[in-house]
Amino acid sequence: QLQLVESGGGLVQPGGSLRLSCAASGFTLAYNTIGWFRQAPGKEREGVSCISADGLYTVYTDSVKGRFTISRDNAKNTVFLQMNSLKPEDTGIYYCAGTGLLATLNSGSYKYWGQGTQVTVSS
């Protein structure tokens, strides 16, 4: 069974940090571009970041550049999203997703999706 599982979400104060993990089972994550998406209440899902299968190419949405870092450990079949200097507007459910296509923040290009992990940034 193909599955992506996110973890690492939680409640953090503004300016704090969280590290999200996306673990794959049932398929080899190393062959896939992996993206992180988020959805805030009442808003559409947006692409946050993605990383190519070989880890050499990354994309970030403008609002997280300089604060978030995506990385991958193909030996562990896991992708990470390090989130620093968190802001209240970063609050939402964060999903990881996989595609065999090139790196893109277009959610329609992704075939495999996790169930999401909640990130809440609040004082």
Image: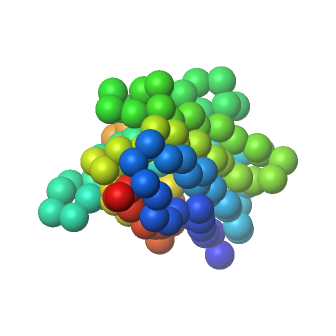
Q: Position of residue 104 (x, y in %)?
A: 42, 34
Q: Position of residue 80 (x, y in %)?
A: 63, 47
Query: Would you place residue 66 above or below residue 64 in this image?
Result: above
- Judging depth in this view, the residue of 19 and 121 nearest the camera is 121
**On the rendered structure, is 32 left or right of 60?**
right
In screen coordinates, is 58 left or right of 120?
right
Q: According to the image, what is the colour scheme of the structure? A: rainbow
Identified at 46% across, 58% down, the residue is 12
Looking at this view, name the residue that lies furthest to the bottom.
1
Identify the residue at image location x=58%, y=43%.
82
- The residue depicted at 65 percent of the width and 24 percent of the height is 56
Q: Identify the residue at image location x=65%, y=48%.
A: 79
| Residue 25 appears in the picture as rendered | yes
Total numbered circles: 0
Q: Is residue 4 visible?
A: no
Q: Would residue 116 appear left or right of 62 to someone viewing this image?
A: right
Q: Position of residue 34 (x, y in %)?
A: 55, 45
Looking at the rendering, in which quadrant would you find the N terminus?
bottom right
Residue lying furthest front: 123
Image quadrant containing the C terminus: bottom left
- Residue closer to the observer: 79 or 20: 20
Farthest residue, direction right = 75
x%, y% of residue 65?
A: 42, 27
